[in-house]
Each structure stands twice: as structure tokens, then as C-alpha cells.
Image: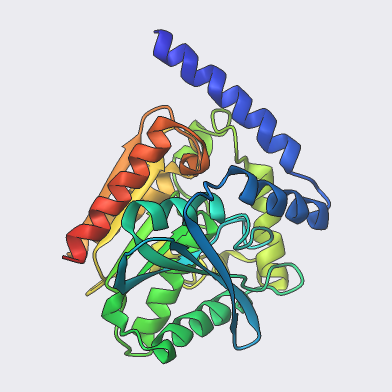
Amino acid sequence: MASEKSHQGLMQLIKMAHGFIENTDLEKHRHSQDQMGPLLAPSKDMLISDVDIDGMHGEWVCVNRAHMKKYVILYCHGGGYSTGSSLYARTLTTKLAASTSMDVLSFDYRLAPEHPYPAALEDALKAWNHLMQYGYGARDVLVAGDSAGGNLALALTLKLKEQARLLPKGLLLMSPWTDLAGSGKSYLSKRDADPVLNAGYLDAMKENYLGAQNTQETWADPFVSPLYGDFEDFPPTYIQVGDQEILRSDSVLLYKKMNKAGVNVKIDIYKGMWHVFQMSPLKTAYDAMEKNAEFIFSLCR
């Protein structure tokens, strides 16, 4: 009972903090996130360097010690395709680099509504191609992402598959937004529980991202809603989601569909946790990042 009360109190604090960062003015919202990212990210023993990816900004996040160079993590940040950046993503990329001792490349794809779909997907392909030109092979790259970044990680892999190219070694998804049609049960059952996301916010992000293409027909496009994709021969995938988030069904339905397609897929549903709880300075968040590292190590022995 005490643990449950503690979780509820924490969720109220998260709701207040998220409300402080969130702003209907997109530029202010983006600026707030960029300030919060480095503040919450563990910077000790980290090397962060800017990189130009064919005119797109990116950054390498690396541990400042001897570490594995053979494999690399390509990170797709979240933010509803309208906000977020590699700066904001440091709350996750630094933890990933620290727990795996691998280099992480994040990139600043173009944001909506200034640059609607498919701009972000085109930029993800640009980042992928950069790694290939940098000397990595497809099987040396793990693609990770949170929220809309999880959507982008899946869409990128589906696009590579469509182009008959080699696929990443694995996918790591935290609270992925997989179904813009919002067909899952959690959109109703968790609409009041999730301290981070709500239906109004998701609708606004969808409108920004799709613009004139914001139709039911487009929602079913696998490059927009990866849940409707073909996952045959997909790489091993690990999904983490909180049981209190509105997007819970997006992860559960994805897991079921991947499992049916024969994908080596695993899901962990974290009790009492919210959308992308891994960003929070909590023991559960650090435990989840260790589980992410275990998944990556299982593929990169």
C-alpha cells in the first residue's frame, strides 16, 4: 500500500514537472526541453561531440574510458515529431552509453509542423546512411528510440526492408508510439492515469506531423503507424512500457504482432510507471536501462 501511494505521489510530481516544461508555444516548449536535457543527464565521464550529417546536426555520446567500438547505437529522440532534440535525448543517450559502453549517435531530424511527414523518416535514412559511410555495417548498428522516436526507429527499419537493404542488428523501443489511429484499449483505460501524455496532446502532435495528410487512410500507413507493418524477418526487438501510460496498447499490440510474425521480441511492462519513465532519476529507470544493456549484450557477444 505504501509503495502504491509513493508511486501515485511521484506520478503527480511528474505531471507537474511535465506541465512546467510543456508549452503551447512550440518554440518555448522546444527551448525548455533543450535546457532540461543536459540538466537531468549524467555527464560524468561522458564525451559529447557534434557531428554534421550531410547538413543535419547530430551528436556522438561516448564514455570517456576504454569501450567497445565494434557496435554502435543509432538513437531516435521522442517529442511527438514536433519537439525534442539530441540535447533533450541526453537524459537517455548518456544512460545508454554508460550502461552499454557503446557509442551512441543521436540526430536532430526536422520537426513538424514546419517539416511534416515524411521529413523525419528521410532524415533517419540520412543518419543510417551516414553510419554506413562511416564504416559500420548494418549488423553493427542497433536502432533505439523513445515515444515518437520508437515510431521512427520502426519506420526506418520498415523502409530499409522495403528497399531490400540489410536491417539493423536489433531494435530497442521505450514507450513507442506505434498506432496513430489510437485503436488500443489504453487510450481509454489510461487516459486519466498517464501523467505525461493525454489524448489532446497526441491529437495536436498528429495534426502537426501529418498536416493535410491527417486522415484515417494515412493513419494506417505502416511508415506513419508501424503497428500496421509487415514484420517478417525483422531484427530482434526489445520493448519497455509503463502500465500507467496511454500508449501501453501501442507496445502490447506491437509485441503480439511481432511475435505472431516470428520475430525474436520481448516486452517488459513496468508496474506503476509512466510514459518514457526511463528519463526520470529513479532506481526503476536505472534498472530498466540495465535491462536495455542486457538485451544489447545478448546480441553483441
Q: Is residue 208 visible?
A: yes
Q: Position of residue 247 (x, y in %)?
A: 48, 45
Q: Position of residue 26 (x, y in %)?
A: 79, 56
Q: Quadrant of the N terminus?
A: top left
Looking at the rendered structure, the number of numbered marks drawn on it comes to 0
Q: Is residue 263 visible?
A: no
- Nearer the observer, 276 or 247: 276
Vertical order, 30 against 290 (above or below): below
Q: Is residue 143 left or right of residue 50?
A: left
- Nearer the observer, 75 or 41: 41
- Nearer the observer, 200 or 234: 234
Q: Quadrant of residue 259?
A: bottom left
Q: Residue at x 31, y 85 (%)?
A: 137
Q: Residue at x 71, y 67 (%)?
A: 112
Q: Is residue 73 left or right of residue 47?
A: left
Q: Position of residue 244 (x, y in %)?
A: 46, 32
- Nearer the observer, 218 or 48: 48
Vertical order, 193 against 66 (above or below): above
Q: Residue furthest top?
A: 1
Q: Position of residue 228 (x, y in %)?
A: 40, 66
Q: Residue at x 32, y 57 (%)?
A: 100
Q: Quadrant of the C terminus?
A: bottom left
Q: Residue at x 42, y 88 (%)?
A: 134
Q: Is residue 189 left or right of residue 166?
A: right
